Amino acid sequence: MIHRRHFLALAVVLLGTMGCSEKSSSTANGPVLRVGMDLSYPPFEMQDASGRPDGVSVRLAEALATHLGRTLQVVPMDFSGLVPALKTGNIDLILSSMTATDERRESIDFSNPYAFTGLALLVSKDSEIQSIEDLNHSGRTITAKAATTGETWAIHHLPNAKRVVFEDQTACVLEVAQGRADAFIYDQLSIYKYAAENKTTTRGLLKPFVEESWAVGIAKGHEALLSQVNAFVDDFRKQDGFSKLGERYLKDEKKFLEAAGVPFILR
């Protein structure tokens, strides 16, 4: 999933200046583990009040670095720059709520999935739209965040609708809230959050029309690291690590989804 994404060159500079090193273990003696993230996607990737990286993915990266015996360095960058940075060796891994799509698999590898979600819709409060099928018509306008699976899905499946794409997801929400777009296509949890924050102007159609999974991105040709990450993901799941992160960062969302009979994203 995906953001103000045109400054890959700046991201390289950030590697040396803004990348925040966080020692996951005081005894870590391996090489620095550089993990790329777009820190504009709370509660998964964000910054705390003091500007330090925080969120589900940061805690997951810390645990992974400890598992590998390496020192963690979170490298902030725009979402669209993550895959290029991985391919050029400027980061070691991507851990940024990224969907493991077939298209992305052509250029990078992915670990075993650690989260399961899907695409949903944010529509205006009084809209007649009830499903994704209602959008594939001329005269409809959909909005999506650049470089996300929502944008890709719209390109391939909604050819008759007008597309308006932004680097910032909050701009997409505003398009719907102010009536300039019929729907915003994004991941289920985000749609839940934005609908709750904009109750007077929007509503969420939360049943996913496409199921997705998130995974750690790894450069091709690094089979040993891929195997190590997979072992970590499997062990972290056995230790209920994902459930604990859900309770810490997504307690309300977890309760809502379980009440609606929808499996929780981290499982």
Image: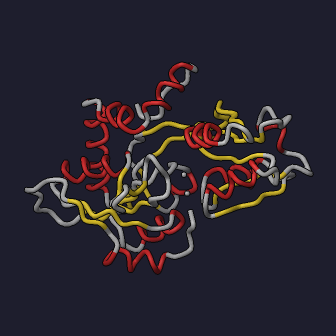
**Residue 37: image x %, image y %?**
42, 60
Left or right of residue 80: residue 226: left
Left or right of residue 96: residue 260: right
Give the vertical position of 189 relative to 169 (above or below): above
Q: Which image quarter is the C terminus in?
A: top left
Residue 51, by quadrant, is bottom left
**Residue 155: image x %, image y %?**
74, 55
Q: Please name whichever residue, 211 or 204, is drawn nearer the observer in this view of the structure.
A: 204
Q: Please name whichever residue, 166 or 96, is drawn nearer the observer in this view of the structure.
A: 166
**Residue 185: image x %, image y %?**
68, 47
Residue 237, by quadrant, is top left
Which residue is at a point 73% across and 51% down the rendered structure image?
A: 154
Give the vertical position of 135 relative to 258 (above or below): below
Which residue is at a point 44% across and 59% down the rendered structure image?
A: 39
Which residue is at a point 40% across and 66% down the rendered structure image?
A: 76
Left or right of residue 37: residue 4: right
The colour scheme used here is secondary structure
Give the vertical position of 69 relative to 221 (above or below): above
Count of numbered marks: 0
Furthest residue to the right?
138
**Residue 190: image x %, image y %?**
57, 43
Furthest residue to the left?
27
